[in-house]
Structure formats: structure tokens, C-alpha cells
Amino acid sequence: MKIQEADAKQLLRAEGLPVPPWSVARSVKEAVTAAEGYLADGSGAVVIKAQVLVGGRGKAGGVKLARSRDEAETAANAILGMSIKGITVRKVLVGPAADIVKEFYLGAILDRASRRIVVMASAEGGVEIEEVAKRDPSAIHREAAHPLLGLADWQARKLAFGIGLAGPHLKSFVLIAKGLVSTMLHNDADLVEINPLAIVRERDADGNTVERVVALDAKIVLDDSGLPRHPGLEALRDLDEEDPADIEARIHDLSFIRLDGTIGCMVNGAGLAMTTMDLVKRAGGEPANFLDIGGGARADKVAAAMRLILADAKVQAILVNIFGGITRGDEVARGLIEARAIQDREVPMVVRIVGTNAEEAGALLRDARFETAATLDEAAEKAVAAARAVGGAA
């Protein structure tokens, strides 16, 4: 689950990381009020940033500076309601503009290969880390945190030295790098990213110019499987930006990922689903989705899964592959019959059901005139052929 920048900053602040003040505004009036407050406090300018769960906000015009009330109003008017990569901006973050001395990248990810949290740092902050990795992999420095002890001080210092950060800012960097790991652990996150992490100039209480290291941006991706352990984090989900199909899949406890092919797949079990997709590709087709209905699926859940598949206009055929262990084949068959009775468009369907109550399922499907298959290879070939026939007819 991706969360908005403002919410990510709140989680970083909860771990003691230095984050400049901010406000979230859902209207031009709210944005102007927030901007006036920061300008009155002595900020020479404010930054107004679109809050959307995609990258490239700056390039799309979703980040603007304002040095007065009128400029803030103009910027908020321009950003609120604009579309960035198909996402409509419904709220903005407003905060004092930073006097940046130097930008860095700092991020922590869950590396499944090493089974560790890996902290990455780069002297090239403010740009997408994927671009840096592609252009110059040596510019990214990595340290794997210990699964029990976390990131050691010496590891954080090694990262700092690698990106050319030393002197009075070294201690701050060490605390921030270790804070990223604790943020991941305390929130069951897959990714915690600060880009840019910046050295900024500020005025202290005596009016003197000082420099400190702060998190100017934040990105956090939470593990959905960990949300039951953190009830408060579910409230951070932004339903405005979620695909309606993903929302429905979560409601019905379905594992669903939309792909680019034309053959919808409904399977029980992640391993069997992957195998089914592989055999569809071997037969010359392309899967339109990954969909695991799980064990013990009843008719209503199967019907919901079918609605998800049919909601994709690219789907030209459907392959249902069920191995009945906990899942009863006759329950799946009833769900398929129910779903087909209410579907709003005709799509060829090939069904293979083996295991528990497979014979009962076969009888139900034959009575309802479903296309069936005895083996997975046969099912995949029939589904690919049906999709080609539909595509050719179109």
C-alpha cells in the first residue's frame, strides 16, 4: 500500500527524523491560508506540491514555488484539479521552501535475495534512483542491516563517506539512516525513501545562519499483509487513487494483479496461478491478470472474481483452473454459473476443475454448456484459441 507524502513524513517524524513543517490543503482557500502562515513566520517562499501516488510531479508542473499570497493562490489553482499520469490532484502539500545546499538520496528496501533490509545512498539526490542505477550503478552505495540489531553506526558512516557527506553533518546522517530502518520495522514497510535528503540553510533562534540535514520528501510503501498489526495505518489508504478493481479484490480477499494480455485467469493457489500463466504463454497467449481466489472459495467469491476479470475490456477469453483441496469444485461451478448469468458481455470460458467434488462440478458445467478441459495444457490451448477467434472476429 502506497501512502501520500504527507503521511509518509508523519511516520518519519514519529521515529524522530528531521522533517520540515507542512500543511495539507484540499482547496485553494486552504492552500492560501497555509502559505500565508509560513510567509508570516519569515519564510521567503513556500512550496506547493501535488499529492499523488506517482512520480514525476515536478516535470508535470505539480510542484511550484510562491513568494506571496497571490502567487500561492495562482499555484494552488494551477495544481489542484490537474492530471498527472492520469491521476487527478485532489490535495496539495504546502510548506516553507528550503534553501538547499546539497541533495542526496537515501532509501531502505526489503531485499528478498539477501533477506535483509538494505539501505541505499547516493550523492545524486532529487532524481529517480532507477535513472541513477541505469546510468551509473557505482553511484549507489548499499549496506545490509542486521535482522536483529538493525543498521550499525559504522555502516551508516560508511554510507555517508561513500556519498561525500562528512564533518558536522555525519552524526545527523547516521541517525537518519538508522531511523529509516526503524521506520520500516515499526510499520512493516517494504520501502522507505527520502529523495531528496538535503543539507539546508536555516536561521537559528539568534538569527544566525546554520546548516542541517532534513528529509524534504518521503515515500513509503507498506506491506498489506502487515496492516492487521497496525490498525491505524489502514486509514492512510487513499481510495481516490486506487484502481476500483483493486478495491473490490481486497473486499473479497482476492489476490489480483492486472496484466496486459487478453486471457483472464482464475485459479486457486499462487503457485498454480503462476503455472497457469506460464502455460498460457507457452500456448501462444498472454495472461490478462493474476488472480488467486484462495482456498475454500465459495460461489459468491468466485462470482466476484469473474466480475473483476470481465471488467477488463481487453479480456477475450477466460481460463478457470481449480484444484479442489479445501476448495469444493461444485461451489466454484455454481459461482461460475451465477457469474455468467449476470455478466454484461459474452466472453468464451474454458474450465478445468479437478479434486474435491470434481465430478459434481463437471455435471453442473456440462448442464450449463460450459467449455471444459481435462488437462491444464488442453485448457490453455483452448483458451488461447478462443481468444484468437474473438480477436479475429473483431
Image (cartoon, rainbow, N blue to C red):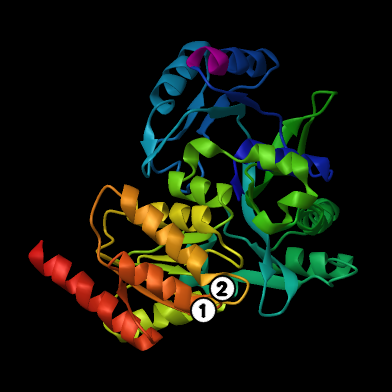
Residue in view at x 55 percent, y 59 percent = 298
Q: Where 124 sits versus 350, above or below?
A: above
Residue in view at x 67 percent, y 28 percent = 22
x and y percentages locating residue 255 in the rendered image: 54, 61
Amino acid type indicated by mark 1 = Leu
SS class, disc 2:
loop
x and y percentages locating residue 203 in the rendered image: 76, 28
Q: Residues within 10 Å of mark 1 (few under 14, many from 20)?
A: some
SS class, disc 1:
helix
Amino acid type indicated by mark 2 = Gly
Front position in the image: 107 or 163: 107
Find disc 1 in the rendering and name its residue.
272
Q: Which residues are magenta?
A: 28-32
C-alpha span from label 1 to label 2: 5 Å
Numbered label attached to residue 269? 2
Q: Where 226 sits versus 23, above or below?
A: below
Q: Could you tell me which quadrant the C terminus lies in?
A: bottom left
Q: Where 33 sits versus 322, above or below?
A: above
Q: In which image quadrant can residue 162 be found?
A: bottom right
Front position in the image: 297 or 221: 297
Position of 229 compared to 189: left or right?
Answer: right
Residue in view at x 45 percent, y 32 percent = 89
* One can see residue 337 in this view: yes
Position of 334 compared to 19: left or right?
Answer: left
Indicate whether residue 147 is drawn in magenta. Answer: no
* One can see residue 213 in this view: no
Residue in view at x 84 percent, y 72 percent = 146
Q: Are marks 1 and 2 in contact (CB under 8 Å)?
A: yes
Q: Residues within 10 Å of mark 2 (few under 14, many from 20)?
A: some
Dominant SS in magenta: helix
Q: In which image quadrant can residue 147 be found?
A: bottom right
